[in-house]
Amino acid sequence: MKWISWLGTKYATIASRWFFITAFAMTAVCGIATSGAARDEAGADNGMAGQNDPTIGFAEVRVNNSHHTPMAGEAYTNTFLGRTINIPARQRENILSLSLGATFYDPEVGGNLGLPIAALYWRHRWQNWWTRDVIGLFVNEMDVARSFGRFQLLGHFENNTVPFADTEIKDGQEVKSSSVIWGTASGWLGAGIRIPVAPYQADNDLRFQLFYHAGYFYNMRTNDTGSNVRLPPDTFIHGLRLRARYDGFRRNFMELPHEGWAAGGDVDLTRRDNWSDSTFGDLLFKRNETRDYLKFSGYVIGAMGIPWLSERHRFVGYLHGGVSPMGKLDRFTAFRAGGGPFPNETDDLYRLPYPGALFNNFPVSDYVVGTLEYRLELLFFMYLHLRGTFAYGANRPDYSGSDGLRLRLASTDGEAFSAGLTTGFFYNSQLYLEYAYDTKLLRNGTSGNSFMILWSKSF
């Protein structure tokens, strides 16, 4: 099935990429949804205050006699175009939001010149319960926690069950013979501790969590699957995941990190119960090398002011890295990098962004990706972002050779430069625009451009 856009039949490009509607927005909606809620002046208090958040409901009213960047959740008064604007304090725990948009590529990436975005985001806290859900039809993510003081019982469900073919990308083009339909669904049960940290807002905490996860993996051939492709069997999968999260950010009115830092890490040990050798062309994945795997990933993000300049000017740095010291990763277990807006929401900070990439369609086994951003507050509701992103040493799958996921420094190091605009929009909504230029990484030595538009509205 092809998505026919107004660009004409030349742009009918995404036969197997409807998953982008759901999967991309799964992460895009997280940060945009929380900031979209900031536009809703009627949302001063739509639920019970966070159990461990002493600041909710006690916001200082600030008057703009000298410049002050308005902070998330606090009351704010300003004059704009001769009109006095009064923004009441807002409860930030409870959010329901919809995000819609699209991304366009020139030249195409993996046969795609344009992809749509849509997803629903819900986050709510009661006295002792908390939930966070991102709904995208074929790709969904749901979390629930029951608190007993600082101790928590945790549940998590996720599925990626897109019923359309997934084709890997090499040299900027689809490898048709790698086309397969595959998916996973899994549930996690675990326990952890949550400790509130400064500045004691709704999303400031230190969390340690341990999960046992179990689920099912399936895959099947398509009409384009190569004759020399041997798929692994469908199987039960299970393992352990250790997770740590720290968020000490103070966020601004648009829910963008203003000052402070955040960090996190994941350790994932997984076994695929019924497994066998598999091949993709000349690339062989042996059962004893791919059945069990161990992955480490982590991130550090910081935001700060610039000396001698007002707080309109901010630096934000992102650093993500991952490695797999045990087991050989295949196309189904590799880390996934991708495009989309940069993560801002506390539960989305782990996501690995690379401007201009297709969502979640950039498999790597080892990587370091860093971004430095300069952000300028043009108006109290409008922010300009200028970013440079640098990727180093990403091991990529090579479906035409026999070495598999191997280090190719000459071709996999790369840079991307992007400019974005986050702004309040009509009817208490938010609009995000981004242009990105990639020097060589996404199209294997050829530069390219992308443009993204994303609209979000809270209810």
Image (tube, rainbow, N blue to C red):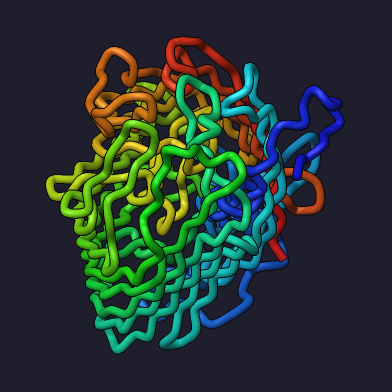
Q: How many numbered marks are there?
A: 0
Quadrant where the N terminus is found in the figure: top right
Eyeballing the image, is 343 above or below 242? Answer: above
Quadrant where the C terminus is found in the figure: bottom right
Left/right of residue 2 with respect to residue 202 in the rendered view: right
Name the residue located 31 percent from the left edge and 54 percent from the top edge: 248
Eyeballing the image, is 188 above or below 341? Answer: below
Residue 31 seen anywhere in this rendered image of the structure: no
Eyeballing the image, is 409 above or below 189? Answer: above
Q: Residue furthest front?
A: 227
Name the residue located 34 percent from the left edge and 71 percent from the top edge: 236
Name the residue located 51 percent from the left edge and 35 percent from the top edge: 177
Q: Residue 171: horizontal and vertical position, in percent?
A: 47, 20
Foreground pick, 86 / 185: 185
Q: Quarter-wise, where is residue 329 in the image?
A: top left
Q: Residue 226: horizontal and vertical position, in percent?
A: 49, 37
Foreground pick, 403 / 100: 403
Eyeballing the image, is 234 above or below 231? Answer: below
Q: Residue 368: horizontal and vertical position, in percent?
A: 26, 32
Foreground pick, 198 / 162: 162
Residue 191 seen anywhere in this rendered image of the structure: yes
Q: Residue furthest left?
A: 325
Name the residue located 58 percent from the left edge and 26 percent from the top edge: 109
Q: Quarter-wise, where is residue 145 in the image?
A: bottom left
Q: Residue 390: horizontal and vertical position, in percent?
A: 35, 22
Foreground pick, 99 / 335: 335
